[in-house]
């Protein structure tokens, strides 16, 4: 039995819009500590603070990587 998509139905596992420091580190192939350093220095898109949690818009991270990882601030 195979799953089929109908027009207008979402994909089975859509990628999340927000990612934590581990998701960003995986995209950048670096450590989580390096991600935090980049964010603190303004060298990457700023995270969104949700209470005590930091999350990044993964679309912003992907666009930043495709744009050559240029300084944000």
Image (spheres, rainbow, N blue to C red):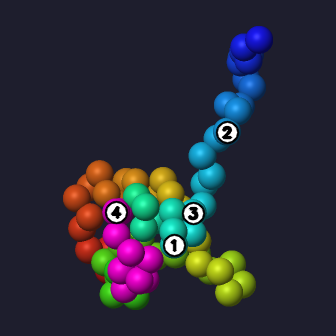
Q: Residues within 10 Å of mark 3 (few under 14, many from 20)?
A: some
* Residue under numbered circle 1: 21
**Residue 64 visible in image:** yes
Vertical relation: 11 (above or below) 21: above
Mark 3–mark 1 distance (CA, rounded to whole Å) = 7 Å
Name the side, left or right, on which 61 lies relative to 57: left
How would you classify the magenta stretch by its main secondary structure? helix
Mark 3 / mark 2, whichever is N-terminal:
2
Check if residue 14 falls in the magenta segment. Answer: no
Tell me the tag on residue 19. 3
Dot 3 and dot 4 residues touching (CB under 8 Å): no
Q: On the rendered image, what quadrant is the C terminus found in?
A: bottom left
Q: Residues within 10 Å of mark 4 (few under 14, many from 20)?
A: few
Question: Which quadrant of the structure image shows residue 10?
Answer: top right
The span shown in magenta is 28-37
Tell me the tag on residue 29. 4
Mark 3–mark 4 distance (CA, rounded to whole Å) = 15 Å
Mark 4 / mark 1, whichever is N-terminal:
1
Mark 2 / mark 4, whichever is N-terminal:
2
Vertical relation: 32 (above or below) 19: below
Check if residue 30 falls in the magenta segment. Answer: yes
- Circle 1 sits in a helix, a strand or a loop, which is it? helix
Residue 58 in picture, x, y percent from top left: 50, 57
Dot 2 and dot 4 residues touching (CB under 8 Å): no
Asked whether 50 or 15 is in front, the reply is 15
| Residue at the image point whose x is 34% and y is 70% from the top | 30
Dot 4 and dot 1 residues touching (CB under 8 Å): no
* Residue under numbered circle 2: 13
């Amino acid at each position: 039995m195979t799953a089929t998509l109908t027009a207008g139905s979402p994909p089975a596992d859509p990628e999340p819009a927000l990612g934590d420091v581990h998701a960003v580190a995986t995209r950048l192939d670096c450590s989580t500590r390096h991600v935090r350093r980049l964010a603190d220095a303004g060298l990457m898109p700023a995270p969104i603070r949700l209470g005590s949690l930091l999350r990044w818009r993964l679309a912003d991270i992907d666009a930043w990587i495709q744009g050559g990882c240029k300084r944000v601030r």
